[in-house]
Image (cartoon, helix red, strand yellow):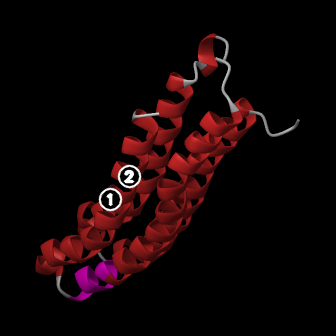
Amino acid sequence: MIFTGQVLAVIGIALAVILPGIGSAMGVRNAGEAGAGVVTEDPDKFGQVLILELLPGTQGIYGLLVGFIIMTKINVFGGMIDLSQAEGMLYLAGSLPIAFVGLLSAIQQGKVSTAGVSMIAKRPKEVGKAMILSAMVETYAVLALLASFLVVYFI
């Protein structure tokens, strides 16, 4: 059978790492493009812009964390343990919250961060508000990380 427990768990690892990574790359790119324009006009705003550009990148880190937790639990680095198909399915299911919420929230956070960069261009003293607006999207990525972590940890 092609979908053994180990294969399902590895698919879960791949989804947890790849999808939030794609979303983070897209979100960081969007904010970076907007930031480049602002910094071109006023290089002193680089630090403020950089913070907003970095925020959408956290989902990729969260996905990688869940992927490493699964890798550790199934002993990928020391010869994988035997998993039943049901156990593999549990690891796959546990990876899904961060995989999909990480993908979508990173893209959306990139859009909010891009708007925040535009805010900084006009009102540099409002950087705190721009960060809070972007961080609100982060809340859902953190909740997905927690859900994935708890499911995977208790398998």
Vertical placement of residue 83 versus 58, above or below:
above
Which residue occupies 43% across, 44% down?
A: 151
Identify the mark at residue 46; answer none if there is no mark.
Answer: none
> Residue 71 in magenta?
no
**What range of the chain is rendered magenta?**
116-122
Image side of residue 40 versus residue 75, left or right? left
Callout in the foreground (2, 1)? 2
Which residue occupies 17% across, 85% down?
A: 123
Q: Residues within 10 Å of mark 2 (few under 14, many from 20)?
A: some
Identify the mark at residue 147; answer none if there is no mark.
Answer: 2
Separation of residues labelled 2 and 1 (CA atoms):
6 Å
Q: Residues within 10 Å of mark 1 (few under 14, many from 20)?
A: some
Image side of residue 152 versus residue 75, left or right? left
Q: Amino acid at mark 1?
A: Leu
Question: What main secondary structure does the magenta stretch of the protein show?
Answer: helix
Q: Nearer the viewer, residue 5 or 148?
A: 5
Question: Which residue sits furthest top?
Answer: 78
Could you tell me if the residues under marks 2 and 1 are in contact, i.e. CB atoms within 8 Å? yes
Residue 102 appears in view:
yes
Q: Which residue is mark 1?
A: 143
Which residue occupies 28% across, 65% down?
A: 139
> Residue 118 in magenta?
yes
Image side of residue 67 versus residue 52, left or right? right
Label 2: which secondary element: helix
Label 1: which secondary element: helix
Q: Nearer the viewer, residue 119 or 36?
A: 119
Q: Amino acid at mark 2?
A: Ala
